[in-house]
Image (tube, grey):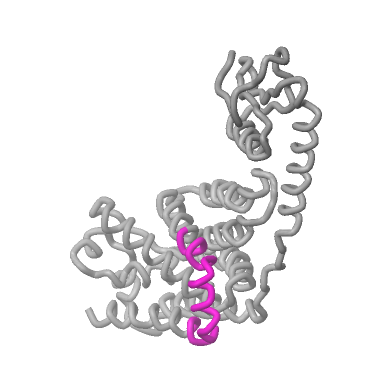
């Protein structure tokens, strides 16, 4: 079935000769435009299975030569896209040490009564209280855990993903984005969820870090010449890990885990933008690390003073 002409009308030299075919119309149109630019008339048609680019028999040899030259130049252009290995930041373990110290220290203090006995009640994510204005619970809830196994699971997963995020973005920046993204996910979950909603734990932060890694890896490599499967592999791998770890265990908060992953993806993609990356590179990692700790300290100050 004839579809359209490209590069002018064909002559009367016989049935068009197919010189290219593709399942994508755009591929044929692109080559028809190129042939038209050098004065070779062509026609795009569809045979029910694929699009065909045809030319007069007399022009077939010249058209094929032009296509070969065009394809060779296109491959060369893709090959010359510079691949700059991603920068890996040193000292990623430092953020993990502070992560363990904060979670374990608060758990030890609460369980041994070293500070206010109602600290757990003042810090948990309570839907009704968040909706009434106690925003700080979105941060404080990240540092509390129901029991030992709950704490150990989040320590292990958090150190793993936190270390990888720290290598990509720097320890301070990674943890600032992780804490901020997880708190935003908690706030959204509590503010728009039922008033009876209750939650504690760093698992939201764990999946925020996972989303951060996945989206940052995807965005920084997106411009490289690669197959579609490889281009989207970081996000797909992140979703697989979210499904694997984020749905395991009885009473798992699937919504909180998914929200954490989504906010992490948004922040990871944002951090990969050149302007944002340049901004973070101008800020020392210890400053962004202190900002992450400071946000938790401020939240606990508001919780204990309320």
Tell whether position 272 is magenta.
yes
Quadrant for the C terminus, please: bottom left
Q: Quadrant of the N terminus?
A: top right
Instruction: Name the residue: 56% across, 62% down.
Output: 216
Whole-percent x, y for residue 173 in the image: 52, 76
Residue depicted at x 72% and y 53%: 77
Nearer the observer, 288 or 16: 16
In this rendering, the answer to whether 158 lies above or below 76 is: below
Q: Is residue 93 left or right of residue 181?
A: right
- In the foreground, 184 or 245: 184
Is residue 150 visible to us here? no
For residue 270, say whether it is visible: yes
Residue 19: x and y in percent read 74, 26
Q: Main secondary structure of the magenta part?
A: helix
The answer to whether residue 241 is left or right of residue 198 is right
Give the image quarter of residue 260: bottom left
Count the labels in the image: 0
Q: Position of residue 220 (x, y in %)?
A: 60, 62
Q: Is 196 above or below relative to 21?
A: below
- 184 with respect to 205 (left or right): left
* As drawn, 301 above or below 55: below
Residue in view at x 48 percent, y 82 percent: 288
Residue 41 painted magenta: no
Q: Is residue 253 left or right of residue 88?
A: left
Where's residue 267, x and y in %?
47, 64
Q: Residue at 53% x, 73% y: name it.
A: 277
Image: 278 above or below 244 = below
Magenta residues? 266-289
Residue sitting farthest toward the left = 132
């Amino acid at each position: 079935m004839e579809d359209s002409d490209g590069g002018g009308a064909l002559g009367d030299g016989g049935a068009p000769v197919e010189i290219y075919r593709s399942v994508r119309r755009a591929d044929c149109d692109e080559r028809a435009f190129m042939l038209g630019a050098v004065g070779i008339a062509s026609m795009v048609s569809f045979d029910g299975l694929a699009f065909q680019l045809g030319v007069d028999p007399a022009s077939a040899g010249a058209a094929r030569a032009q296509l070969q030259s065009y394809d060779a130049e296109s491959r060369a252009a893709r090959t010359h896209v510079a691949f700059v290995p991603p920068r890996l930041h040193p000292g990623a373990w430092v953020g993990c040490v502070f992560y363990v110290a904060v979670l374990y220290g608060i758990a030890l203090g609460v369980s041994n009564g070293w500070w206010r006995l109602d600290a757990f009640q003042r810090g948990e994510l309570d839907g009704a209280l968040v909706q009434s204005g106690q925003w700080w619970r979105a941060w404080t809830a990240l540092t509390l855990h129901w029991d030992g196994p709950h704490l150990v699971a989040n320590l292990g997963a958090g150190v793993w993903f936190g270390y990888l995020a720290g290598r990509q973005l720097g320890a301070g920046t990674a943890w600032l984005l992780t804490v901020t993204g997880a708190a935003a996910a908690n706030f959204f979950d509590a503010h728009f969820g039922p008033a009876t909603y209750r939650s504690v734990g760093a698992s939201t932060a764990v999946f925020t870090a996972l989303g951060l890694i996945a989206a940052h890896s995807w965005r920084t490599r997106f411009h490289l010449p690669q197959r579609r499967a490889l281009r989207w592999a970081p996000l797909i791998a992140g979703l697989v890990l979210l499904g694997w770890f984020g749905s395991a265990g009885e009473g798992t908060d699937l919504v909180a885990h998914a929200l954490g992953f989504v906010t992490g993806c948004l922040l990871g993609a944002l951090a990969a933008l050149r302007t944002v990356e340049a901004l973070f590179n101008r800020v020392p990692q210890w400053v962004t690390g202190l900002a992450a700790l400071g946000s938790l300290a401020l939240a606990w100050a508001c919780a204990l003073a309320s």
